Image (cartoon, helix red, strand yellow):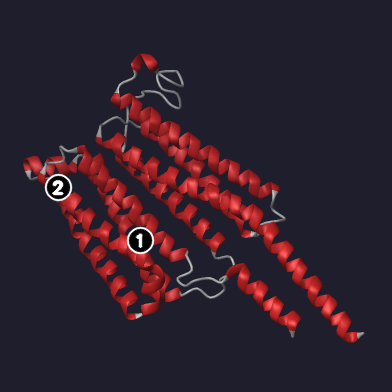
Amino acid sequence: MVFKSNLLCKVIGFNHLINNQLYKSKYLTIFKRLGSHSVLALIALIVIGGATRVMEAGLACPDWPLCYGSFLPFNHMNLRVFLEWFHRLDAFLVGILILFKFSLSIIWKNEIPNWLPKTYSLLLFLVIVQGSFGALTVINLLDSYTVTGHLLIAFLLLITTISINQNLENDDIEEPLIWWRFLLFFPLLLTLIQSFIGVRLSSTWSAHICLSFNKQCLILNTHKLFAFPIAFSILLIIATAIYKRSLLNENWKYLSALIFLLFSQIALGVFSLKTNLNEPIFIIGHQLNASLFIAILTTLIFRNPFNKKGLNHSLNSQMVGINS
């Protein structure tokens, strides 16, 4: 009787585990898919924002949130108006998507991890702040600090969204490699500072003044010098992964992308200066590379650096327990 009772308890526990895991995965899969769409939309938002800045289209729509008093200004449409209008449209869609995810997290709060609704509330707050900065860029006539804050908050949105996605993937990871995360955090921080300097460079016209009149070159020189510690930190990460062969085996795709983006980013920066910043394609590509660079570093920081065993591992453990 005791043996049958123990066996029955294990079977019930096994069934509960299956139902619980499958029930959770049903909701978490939806959040993972929405999260992937959010990452793509945010990268597009950052790149379109960069194109808007490069094409001097930040004030192409003189009012906010509408453009020439309408949602779709057909009568005033040209390339610059389209860039600014599309940038606002993408920002609006990103905001709706994040609001939708936050609403779902409240509705399903009993079926998802406790941290998820709280993190989505932070994401929603960042969206509100981002929208406020978007309005201020128009009201303050493209004030340099406002434009810079607008971009940095967009990067914070991207980092937070990717961290949520990776934490959903690695919900069962209890002991992450802290030293590995710290090693990756250093180039991420440097890249954010580099992006801050880059926006100041373009929004104050310092690069043009320096290249044309050899004045106000401090910001441009600082921007160029920051490439060295970023490159060194990335090479250090690659060397560490090679030394710790398991890290290289599990993360080689991301690490290869980092190396490619690092050298292409340097090349795009050089081409931009060689053409006196007159080729928008190089500057926009520079912005795209920076966004992808930040996205990959964030992914590496928050993902499980090794293969996770997931549901099959848990189920196999329960099966061993039942068989025993």
Quarter of the image with the C terminus is bottom right
Circle 1 residues within 10 Å: few <14, some 14–19, many ≥20: many
Q: Residue at 59% of width from left, 53% of height from top?
A: 29
Residue 111 is left or right of residue 85, and the answer is right
Point out residue 319 in the picture as x, y percentages from the top left corner.
70, 77
Q: Residue at 61% of width from left, 74% of height from top?
A: 313
Residue most extreme to the right: 1
Point out residue 188 in the picture as x, y percentages from the top left corner.
35, 61
Marks 1, 2: nearer the viewer: 2
The kind of secondary structure element at disc 2 is helix
Point out residue 299 in the picture as x, y percentages from the top left corner.
43, 60
CA gap, disc 1 and disc 2: 24 Å
Residue hosting label 1: 188
From what the image shows, is residue 293 above or below residue 283?
below
Q: Which mark is residue 271?
A: 2
For marks 1 and 2, the one nearer the N-term is 1
From what the image shows, is residue 137 above or below residue 300?
above
Circle 2 residues within 10 Å: few <14, some 14–19, many ≥20: some
Q: Residue at 72% of width from left, 81% of height from top?
A: 321
